[in-house]
Image (cartoon, helix red, strand yellow):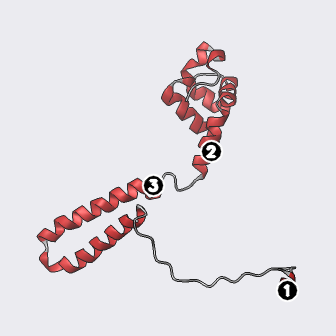
Amino acid sequence: MDDPGQSTTSPEHGHLNRGHTRSQLIRQIATHEHSYAELGRRYGVSRSAISQFAARWALAISDAQRDIDDETTHLWVSHRAARLAELQQTIEDIDSALSEIPDDRAQLLRIRLQAIRQAAEETGQLTQNDDQKTVRIEFNGVDVSQLT
């Protein structure tokens, strides 16, 4: 992401716009956990420098707030690729265990098949079966007999 106000950035505050520092400060402003004065002390700049930074990076801060608001973003299970990787690892672990424990083979095979099914559902190659459901629609304030 380019600095939208790079040409007007004060040289003494330029370190705020450097990669990791910029990303970290954007996130800290988005969380509202610290005042601008406190952030200024942490980054060695004035409160007004933080305020100017926040104005310059308002869109990125807004995007970060949306990400923070999504409570599941930080959970690995909310990310499809992570779930598939974990399912793949489970399948590989079970394959390894199957060769070592012949007595529990049937139970492990059932678990393995469940994991493969979940992986197929995740990739859209297999849809989940939902029982048919009855839907009841009410029209309040509408005389249904008058509809054509």
Q: Name the residue under label 1.
A: 145
Quadrant in which the N terminus is drawn: top right
Disc 3 or disc 2, which is closer to the eye?
3
**Residue shown at the point (12%, 69%) measured from the top left:** 100
Residue 97's spot in the image, x, y percent?
A: 17, 68
Numbered mark located on residue 116 in the image: none
104 is higher (above) or lower (below) than 31: below
**Residue shown at the point (33%, 73%) measured from the top left:** 114
Find the distance from the CA under tag 3 to the CA under tag 1: 49 Å
Residue 25's spot in the image, x, y percent?
A: 57, 33
8 is higher (above) or lower (below) than 119: above
Q: Name the residue under label 3.
A: 79
Numbered mark located on residue 65 in the image: 2
Under mark 3, the amino acid is His
For residue 52, say whether it is visible: yes
Find the distance from the CA under tag 1 to the CA under tag 2: 49 Å
Looking at the image, residue 90 sits to the left or right of residue 143; the answer is left
Q: What element carries label 1?
A: helix
Residue 106's spot in the image, x, y percent?
A: 21, 80
